[in-house]
Image: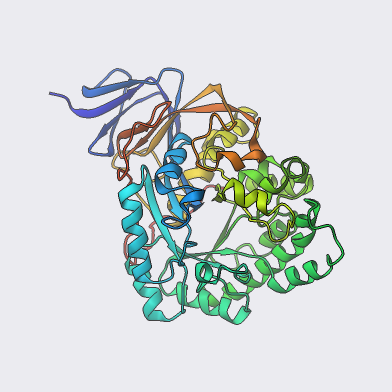
Amino acid sequence: MADYDTIIRNAEVLTPEGLRPVDVALAGGSFAALLPRGEGVSEQTIDATGQHLLPGAIDIHFHIRAPAYPDRGTVESETQAAAAGGITTLFEMPISKPCCNTAERVEIRRAHFAEHAFINFGLYAAPGDLTDTSVQAMAAGGIVAYKIFTTPAPAGRDDEFFGLSFPDEADQMRALKAVAKTNLPIVVHAESAQLLALAEADMIDADLANIDSHLASRPAICEAVAVAKLLLMNIEAGAKLHIAHVTSALTVDVLRRFAGTSDFSAETCPHYLFRTHEDVRRAGVFAKINPPVRLQADQDALWQAIADGIITHVTTDHAAFSYAEKVGGAGNMVTAPPGSPGSEVLVPSMLDAVARGRISMEKAMALLSGNGAKRFNLPSKGHIAVGADADLILVDMNAKTKISPETLLTFARDVAQLYYGAEFQGRIQRTIVAGQTVYDGGIEGRAGWGHYVSPPAAATPADSRLSA
């Protein structure tokens, strides 16, 4: 009689105590035991000789927009791509058509994802009308967090951004205070609407088809001022504030100055850590992302912020548009669709940083998984320990990941030019969700396997400290 469903043998296993040469037993979708080499009996054995066994990535910033816009990808296509990229849980942002801004919309999206997802998923909601009744109802629906923008809704997309865009500072304060009552995080895309308008006004005679015009239209001061105001407001509001996709040295300096003043955290993304505006020039409109990819000095500051524990999360901001939409916007870099697919870049890029000695494996996986589980109060995820959910990846640090339209599974492979030709040291060999293989060089899972993840109701983690 087998003791376990599966035993993964001969890997180097990243545990909370560090890398250990143990075998890992899975049962009932959880980690059942960490065993001495060769011990235990199971129905299935996976030989992972020469590989690292790591917690699956928790991507806390992902846009599929389903069930709207299937021409940009579906839950099936994008969760399969995420699995191939080593992501076992993603948090879907509330931008859809219409916006996910009520408890009813949360339930509709939950049902859609539950039917189609290959990996675990959590949902963000927009705080909508900011009334306590509505905001609390969405929290009761099991969302992981709320999201707002400090910028106006893009032209023609009001229904996608209703209750999500709050360019007025008074409304931003109301949102912080309303969400604080739920004990859930509030994630903010922070750029000053007024300074963005000023920058665009200064470009009245600029060639907007030139890719440089995008960077000029969203200077770093726009991000830094918005972040500074939010952090100052949060001293009074007392929310669990999270700053999305930090891009600039100027914003890093703001985060440093406000350290310890309130409960806040910050993230950045691979396109800011591994690409600069010179790469954007080569990729053109396909590399237009808001906020923009900036200069080498900004990239250096982001890595230093990671080293110092100022930035504690790395996430994709996976945001795909169709090829036709991107090409159609090339004549105006200010209004062209912003976003790039990143589901299959996130983990390989950070493994490459480990291979190059820029960061330790322990810290990389804290940035990709453990810190997200702690910040968003998912105590059974983000670590390999008995009783935790068996969401994990096997990686070969001696193999390479090559990015091209032929290697990508995302529906948006034709707009991933920012990473075409990239080669990363380290490759995802297998992705396991709740104890079952969903990727092993190809997709093996099934639609609907992914579980809806929610924080314990009205609970505060016993230890929410992030790994700097």
Q: Residue 466: x percent and y percent?
A: 51, 51
Residue plotted at (32% across, 66% down): 141
Front-most of 313 and 406? Answer: 406
Q: In this view, does 223 lie above or below 212?
A: below
Residue 373 seen anywhere in this rendered image of the structure: yes
User: Taking 406 as reference, is 432 left or right?
Assistant: left
Percent x, y for residue 348? 55, 33
Quadrant in the rendering for residue 125: bottom left
Tell me: 364 left or right of 451: right
User: Which of the colour schemes (rainbow, by chain, secondary structure, one colour) is used?
Assistant: rainbow
Q: Measured from the top left, where is residue 468 in percent x and y?
A: 57, 48
Q: Indicate left or right for 283 with 111 as reference.
A: right
Which residue shows up at 37% across the image and 80% down it? Answer: 133
Location of the N terminus (image quadrant): top left
Residue 16 visible within the image: no
Q: Work out whether residue 462 or residue 410 is closer to the camera in this orientation and state it.
A: 410
- Could you tell me which residue is drawn at 79 percent across and 71 percent down? 198
Give me the residue at 85% from left, 61% from top.
206
Q: Position of residue 443 (x, y in %)?
A: 39, 32
